[in-house]
Image (cartoon, rainbow, N blue to C red):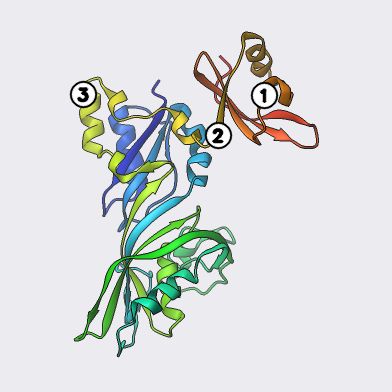
Amino acid sequence: MLNGIVPLFKEKGMTSFDCIRKMRGILKMKKIGHSGTLDPNVDGVLPICIGKGTKVVDYLMSSGKVYRGSITLGFSTTTEDLDGDVVERKSLKKKLSDEKINELLNSFVSDDLIQIPPMYSAIKVNGKRLYEYARNNEKVERPEHHVQINYFKQIKDSFYDSTKHEQTIYFEVGCGKGTYVRTLAVDFGKKIGIPAVMSNLTRIKSGNFTIDQTVKLSDVEDAMHKDNIDSVMYSIDHALLQYKHVEMSDSQWKLVQNGVWLRPDELDINDEKCVLTYKKDIKALYYFSKDKQAFKPEKMFSNK
């Protein structure tokens, strides 16, 4: 069975599940998942986890994401992007200066930014997804969502359309998991009393993968035909690069196989978490318990 991660380039018009379904058909296996949904009109990096790779989905998602896109000021839509119906228009009589744009973008940088999820999203409220309420024109109170914004910056000069009285701002944002970039665009406009929409978005980094490392579905299909799937697939270790790796001795491996805790002096590290390998093969992720003063298993990848 195949085990690893394929850094797929998701094209616009496809859902994340479309990618999973096609990958299952190409690889002829069911144990496949992705790390972080991308909306149909968003393209970019979508790490696909295969076989034992599904065990590292959470670690891929927690490593943060980077997006590039654009915000257009002057109108808003039902979906907060260009897929929805226009619900409000308001002319921007004067072009925003770079100084003002940078000030507004920087105001979102926070370790704990509160967002209200868009109605057209998959968040569940009372057992029902928000987009289901939206499609039925039903009102429901949306829960607060806490996210991390590492940076939010302009990447090139904005464009002011003097005929439509709209302005488009081109940005890059580095953020934590669960961030609604559509909502960042809308909230940017709210800060100056102008309706806004996310007019374009590409995810350029996710789960330690950058967009230049991605492959297309056709590349995966070609690799399978040539019996060279390793050319498009990375080891599950790629999701765990942020942790120190410790190679176990034979005796340590026998203990870890049975889920035994290890003392810090046995591993000779000061980190809170570490990846344990045996004969250079990843076996487990251990974390340090302050209560027990020992390293305990957080995730077992293999006990064979």
The label shown at residue 268 is 1
Q: Quadrant of residue 194?
A: bottom left
266, above or below 192, in the image: above
Label 3 crowd bin: few (<14), some (14–19), many (20+), radius 10 Å:
few
Can residue 262 be seen from the camera position used here?
no
Q: Distance between the residues labelled 1 and 3?
A: 45 Å
Which numbered disc, 3 or 2, marks the residue that appears first in the sequence? 3
Q: Which residue lies furthest to the right in this view?
A: 291
Task: Look at mark 2 in the image and give the residue it sits on.
Answer: 243
Is label 1 in contact with label 3 (beta carbons under 8 Å)?
no
Name which of mark 1 and mark 2 comes first in the sequence.
Answer: 2
Horizontal side of 222 relative to 142 (left or right) equals left
Whole-percent x, y for residue 169 in the image: 31, 71
Q: Return the residue nearer the eye: 66 or 190.
A: 66
Disc 3, disc 2: CB below 8 Å? no
State which tag comes first along the sequence, 1 or 3: 3
Q: Position of residue 24 (x, y in %)?
A: 34, 33
Q: Residue furthest bottom?
A: 93
Q: Which of the numbered marks, if any, corresponds to residue 182? A: none
Residue 291 shows up from this direction: yes
